[in-house]
Amino acid sequence: MLVESWLDSANAEGCPFPVNNLALGVFSVGEDLPCCGVAIGDMIFNCRSACQAGLLQPENCRLFDAPSWNAVMEAGPAIWRDLRLQLTELFVKGCKNQAEVREHLVPISDATLHMPFRVAEFTDFYAGRHHATNVGTMFRGAENALPPNWLHIPIGYNGRASSVVVSGAGVRRPWGQLKSPDHEKPAFLPSRRFDFELEMGAIVGTPSTGPVSVDEADSMIFGYVLLNDWSARDIQAWEYQPLGPFQAKATATSISPWIIMAEALEPFRVMTPEREFELLPHLKDTGPMLYDINLRVDLATSEGPVQTITQTNYREMYYSAAQQLAHHVSSGCPMRAGDLLGSGTISGPEKHQRGSMLELSWGGKEPIELLAGRKRTFLEDGDTVILTGEARGKDYIIGFGECAGQLLPALEEPYGKQD
Amino acid sequence: MLVESWLDSANAEGCPFPVNNLALGVFSVGEDLPCCGVAIGDMIFNCRSACQAGLLQPENCRLFDAPSWNAVMEAGPAIWRDLRLQLTELFVKGCKNQAEVREHLVPISDATLHMPFRVAEFTDFYAGRHHATNVGTMFRGAENALPPNWLHIPIGYNGRASSVVVSGAGVRRPWGQLKSPDHEKPAFLPSRRFDFELEMGAIVGTPSTGPVSVDEADSMIFGYVLLNDWSARDIQAWEYQPLGPFQAKATATSISPWIIMAEALEPFRVMTPEREFELLPHLKDTGPMLYDINLRVDLATSEGPVQTITQTNYREMYYSAAQQLAHHVSSGCPMRAGDLLGSGTISGPEKHQRGSMLELSWGGKEPIELLAGRKRTFLEDGDTVILTGEARGKDYIIGFGECAGQLLPALEEPYGKQD
């Protein structure tokens, strides 16, 4: 049910940021230093100035000093809940401090959005069954599509935190070592098969130093963002044996600028799919662990209108973020506030629900048709990929905002002019 | 040539820390807060108190505020060189400030050593040819030992910075999902094939945001440590296809407590081995890029005396740290001060020069014989693995200190008592 606000724009139909959401970001206006803010309707609430003015509990003010939400994460789940309560009280219809609260609002459209948190480390999973099946079928045939371990553990690998950027940042087509099957020797060239991957990112808020149960893991997750794990398929094909993807995934990973707190998503919990093999006890589902979140990818090209190229849902995953996290720490691997877990590419069972160009164009063999007669196999310079997501309640929406990035042309001479 | 000091212990034969070395660590004595120090002879020089007392340039004092050398790294190569000059002047024979300098010395034996820097991110390579050939022969046969890409790029994968610990920290045998070839289903068990890996770690001091040449990469490296990349071979065997090692390598990676600055190793540069295939231009050797550093692994068990189980040299690598770093950023991957690059396991051509139990016991099939009639295939609970390293000049040594870790028994019930 919509929690009504005195701020009309927060109640408007289709508004992504009603009081139910309380999305967390880092913003700046003009030359001001970036600071913590909460999206509400079409406005951002400045948590730092509001706390200094006494609208939020004074003992919380130190949490808003840095331009990131890491300090709030580190403060622990009791503070997360308490902060949501305080914010709800300030924005709910009937709040008596409206005038004071208004002084700390700025229009979203006036603000620049920054990375909402410092990424401690970044892990990327491969936990969508349709995606893994599609990719496996292309590379190993339908019979051997899923590796033998796939239905028993959420396969993941460590990514590169330094390469995570916020929506809006341009992404430069990388150079890399490639070897096409028809060439005898590898060459160093700009990637020719550059791709997006539609994912959700789960943000770990509570640190750990040893194994945790799936339920404990679930309660450690602070919130979620949209995530595009840009991928150079041709670099990956040459480098990934035997130790996995490395430079193919290191150019950039984009995330949406608003952290949607796990609590805002509670009404949208759904079950994981039926299990083909029973999971081992430490990974077993303990209830509905995925979320019903509609996801969409739009492509903007220089030649035609923006166009939706895929639509799917986060519930298509085989493993939940809690199960991924429980597996991640099973060896004793320490987790820290700000660790980011990519879900893996989210594809649905149908062709128009596939979460990457690799799958949409079936390895480049079946170009996708765009309006104005254009086609795409992989991304072209100038293309902008826009991820959006929303959970739909009866009369309100929990919106994620967008995760957009434009592909910039490769450097002409990555090592400068050679004489 | 030995740079003689007024501090006799720094001139003693076999001393690992002469004035030529100036190894950087973080230490504490008693209840004092950890702080930056430099090893000299059998003493540690307290950089913070010495700077406050005016013995080091006052504008450098802020670099020693935090208990890590990251601020010095971030200050850039001119400061690295300048700091070495200042320290050399304070310790060289004939220095007039001896009495004042002595006030800032504490015996190494009285100090606790901490992590010398904050690890930004950790990357592990697989760049030793003997190791890769041994492992490949065991798993794929001698004909296919090296993957097709191996002689063209330094294969690497992202590791887990949160799991890097300093020498002396105990390492708990992990639980993990395993599947022996003779079992139909995977099980969750304590690892039975837990191993060490003898490596060197290169520490990136200068950040970058795009491709850099091998020479630039070389100048970005601040220093080196010894590194033990603890590995659960049975977890790895089940999980590593298709995205590489994950939980098998996430329990812990130990490093030695002293950063040996690259400048201290200059006299020990040696050529990389002859190339079977010419490297692509952006990875080509530009001069002697490896270092002549003797490495040794000792094993201490509960049943017998400490015993050397392998001896090799860093010059056995196929790729230098500079080449690994140049490859690492070829896609545009940003690097930050404090990034740690593991060399990959360093094995020599002979059996007694192998850098892991996996190789020494040939996959467990040829147990190594210890004194007192004991044998080992992989590590047993209570075993302590001790890595040491030194570069030997004509009349002095650049010592690395030791990188030691004891294997503690697995948790009895990783998820607490189940009723």
Image (cartoon, coloured by chain):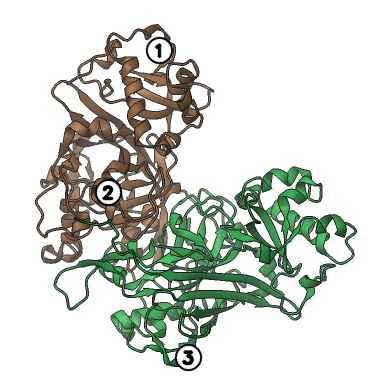
Chain colours: A brown, B green
Q: Identify which amino acid the numbered label 3 is placed on.
A: Leu
Chain of the residue that carries numbered disc 1 in the rendered image: A
| Mark nearer the N terminus (2 vs 1) | 1
Few, some or many residues within 10 Å of mark 1 (<14, 14–19, 20+): some
Looking at the picture, tell me which residue is in the foreground, A58 or B18.
A58
Say yes or no: labels 2 and 3 on the same chain: no
Q: Secondary structure at mark 1?
A: helix
Q: CA distance from mark 2 to mark 1?
A: 47 Å
Q: Secondary structure at mark 2?
A: loop
Pointer 2 residue: A378
Q: Which residue is identified by label 1?
A: A101
Quarter containing the N terminus of chain A: top left
Please tell me how crowded label 3 is: few (under 14), some (14-19), or many (20+) other residues with Cα within 10 Å.
Answer: few
**Circle 1: residue type:** Val
On the rendered image, what quadrant is the C terminus of chain A found in?
bottom right
Measuring 27% from the left and 26% from the top, which residue is drawn there?
A: A21
Question: Residue A238 placed where, x, y %?
Answer: 34, 64
Residue at 34% in and 36% down: A77
Mark 2 in CB contact with mark 3 (< 8 angstroms): no
Mark carried by residue B59: none
Location of residue A123 with respect to A290 vertically, above or below: below
Position of residue A131 relative to residue A304, above or below, is below
Q: Is label 2 on the same chain as label 1?
A: yes
> Subunit of mark 2?
A
Instruction: Tell me the element at label 3.
Output: helix
What's under tag 2, amino acid-wise? Phe
User: In the rendered image, is residue B87 in sight?
Assistant: yes
- Is residue A384 something one can see in this rendering? no
Q: Tell me residue A174's x, y (percent).
A: 41, 51
**Residue A45's image quarter?**
top left
